[in-house]
Image: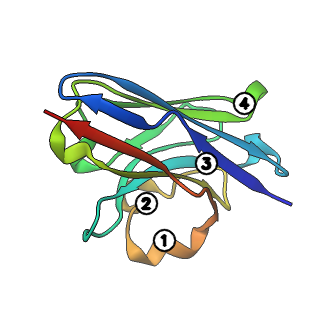
Amino acid sequence: QVQVMESGGGSVQEGGSLRLSCRTSGLTFGDHAMAWFRQASGDEREGIACITWTGGTIWYGDSFKHRFVISRDNAMSTVYLQIDNLKLEDTATYYCAARLYANCGGPRWTDSSERETWGHWGQGTQVTVSS
C-alpha cells in the first residue's frame, strides 16, 4: 500500500520560514517524479514545484520561482519544500504527490491534462501565515 505523508506545516508569522517534508512508503521512490501543490480555501489547486527522479531537473510554477525550493533525498524516500519569507497569501494546505513517471512532464506539468499522471497524493499539511 502506497503512503504519502506530509509534515512540517504549522502557524508562522509573516517573514518566517518553513520546511515541509513528504515521506513515501510502498513505492520505489526513485522511480517517481515528486511535486508539491497547494490549495487555499476557495481557490484552485496550484502546482508549486516538481522534481525529477534524480533531482536533476526542477520545474517551478510561475508564482513560485523565488521563495520556494524543492529538493529530494532518495535514500530517505523524502521530498522537501523550503519556503522562505512567508506571506499571508501562502496560507493554504500543501500537498505532496508522486507522479506515475520518473520525469515531470515538462513545463506543462501543472496542466489539467496531466492530472491523471499524479497517481499518489498525501493528505496535506496546513500552513497558516499570520501578521
Residue 9 picture quarter: top left
Total marks shown come to 4
**In the picture shown, does residue 74 fall above or below 47?**
above
The residue indicated by pointer 4 is 74
Q: CA distance from mark 4 to mark 1?
A: 24 Å
Residue kind at label 3, given as amino acid type: Ala
Q: In the picture provided, is 58 more to the left or to the right than 100? A: left
**In the picture shown, does residue 63 fall above or below 43?**
above
Is the Cβ of the residue at disc 4 closer than 8 Å to that at disc 1? no
Is the Cβ of the residue at disc 2 closer than 8 Å to that at disc 1? yes
Disc with the residue nearer the chain's start (4 vs 1):
4
The residue indicated by pointer 1 is 114
Q: Residues within 10 Å of mark 2 (few under 14, many from 20)?
A: many
Q: Residue at x 80, y 57 (%)?
A: 2
Q: Which mark is residue 33?
A: 3
Disc with the residue nearer the chain's start (2 vs 4):
4
- Residue 102, image x, y percentages: 66, 50
Check the image and name the residue furthest to the left.
131
The residue indicated by pointer 2 is 109
- Residue 84, image x, y percentages: 28, 24
Which residue is more in the foreground, 21 or 68?
21
Q: Residues within 10 Å of mark 1 (few under 14, many from 20)?
A: few
Is the Cβ of the residue at disc 4 closer than 8 Å to that at disc 3? no
- Residue 99, image x, y percentages: 62, 58
Q: CA distance from mark 2 to mark 1?
A: 6 Å
